[in-house]
Amino acid sequence: MDAKAARGRSSNVQREDETMDLRRGPWTVDEDFTLINYITNHGEGRWNSLARAAGLKRTGKSCRLRWLNYLRPDVRRGNITLEEQLMILELHSRWGNRWSKIAQYLPGRTDNEIKNYWRTRVQKHAKQLKCDVNSKQFKDAMRYLWMPRLVERIQAAAAATTTTAPATTQNGTSSAGSTTSTITTNTHHHDHNLGVHKGQMALPPDFGVAKTTPSCTPENSSTAASSESYGTDQISQVSKFKDYYVNIPVNNNPSQDYFPIAGFQGQSLTSPAGNYFNTALDLQAMEQNNQWLEGGDTSDNLWNVEDTWFFHQQLHNTGI
DNA sequence: AAAGCACCCAACCGCATTACC
DNA sequence: GGGTAATGCGGTTGGGTGCTT
């Protein structure tokens, strides 16, 4: 038994595992085949007895997890598409860490996968911005910077496919999946529970951002719908952002200037808390330190330096 | 080329809820 | 109604892998 297997287990469980000679850790191909074969013939459920009957030296829990997260035929694998990213951001803003609930709206995606995406991608950005992922300022940044940009990139990809194929995203990276899955409203439910066609994402009621075409504004986004968390001042503050998005053309080069803020470069900002920082220096430091702005997973490159500046400006304006 | 580091993800855990006897 | 088993969920973590130095 390896160290991982022993992690955090109670002595009782460990004794049980040892007496039953249960396996732990990564699944082998043979185990996968055995599980698939058994479920194909007998169906799923009753996982403990299933594990015994199939001859697997695994707990029922382990079998269930392996099947649901990996072996199920309808499980989708591969990169999270732009539409899926947008959906995750939107649904998380509404429900928080209700991963299974969020996963219901992304057919083929598991709660585990969405949770991993959130922790590795989204929380990484929060960390880069030196703020808490649950903080209002980061949520605002997601809503007014990240999500609108996702919408624009989705639109750009869709537009590209109408004229040429195969399509690429604005930054030239593959957009596999983003043009094949479809965001649809849930006004017509065909699935038992969620109105989900295979390969399509159903939107929950009053889903905001994806409905906004071609311009995503805070007012008609879900954020406005969920404005119970915002005061009047914040709403009016938010309305100032609208102009940024209403007339912004689809930008085919996200790395280029995105917001009309060039004139602000070099301005000094003073936060309400009295923290002083020089924008130019700050941006320079970010460019040096934040590799995710330039490289890495291109699907995450929805922020650029200007976005980050904008983010900090909002901290300033909203008195955070 | 090797060591160190960061990231990603599969798999685990404990706890809560539901189903069954 | 109470006890137990099964299931579901969210949080956590270690190993693999690729990148950087």
Image (cartoon, coloured by chain):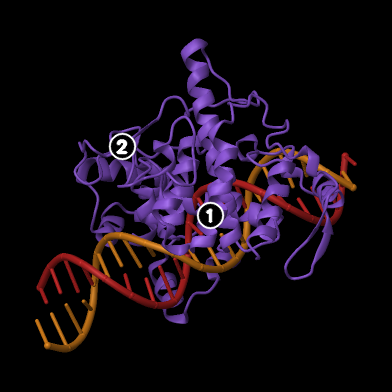
Chain colours: A purple, B red, C orange
- N-term-proximal mark, 2 vs 1: 2
Q: Which residue is mark 1?
A: A236
- Report the residue at 66% width, 42% height from top: A303
Query: Which corner quadrant of the image does residue B3 belong to?
Result: bottom right
Tell me the subunit letter for badge 2: A
Q: Secondary structure at mark 2?
A: loop
Q: Secondary structure at mark 1?
A: helix
Amino acid type shown at disc 1: Ser
Look at the numbered discs 2 and 1 and tell me whether their residues touch, using CB distance below 8 Å: no
Amino acid type shown at disc 2: Thr
- Report the residue at 43% width, 36% height from top: A212
Tell me the subunit letter for badge 1: A
Q: Label 1 neighbourhood size at 10 Å, few (<14), some (14-19), many (20+)?
A: few
Q: Is residue A286 visible?
A: yes
- Report the residue at 30% width, 41% height from top: A37
Q: Position of residue A237 (x, y in %)?
A: 57, 54
Q: Which residue is mark 2?
A: A185
Instruction: In the rendered view, tell whether residue A46 sits above or below residue A295.
Output: below
Front residue of this view, candidates A20 and A183: A183
Q: Is residue A56 visible?
A: no
Q: CA distance from mark 2 to mark 1?
A: 29 Å
Q: Quadrant of the C terminus of chain A?
A: bottom right
- Determine which of the numbered discs, if any, sits on residue A144 in the image: none
Q: Label 2 neighbourhood size at 10 Å, few (<14), some (14-19), many (20+)?
A: some
Query: Which corner quadrant of the image does residue A314 belong to?
Result: bottom right
Q: Is residue A302 left or right of residue A87?
A: right
Q: Is residue A238 left or right of residue A281?
A: left
- Report the residue at 49% width, 64% height from top: A231
Query: Which corner quadrant of the image does residue A59 belong to?
Result: bottom left
Q: Position of residue A209 (x, y in %)?
A: 44, 41
Q: Quadrant of the N terminus of chain A?
A: bottom right
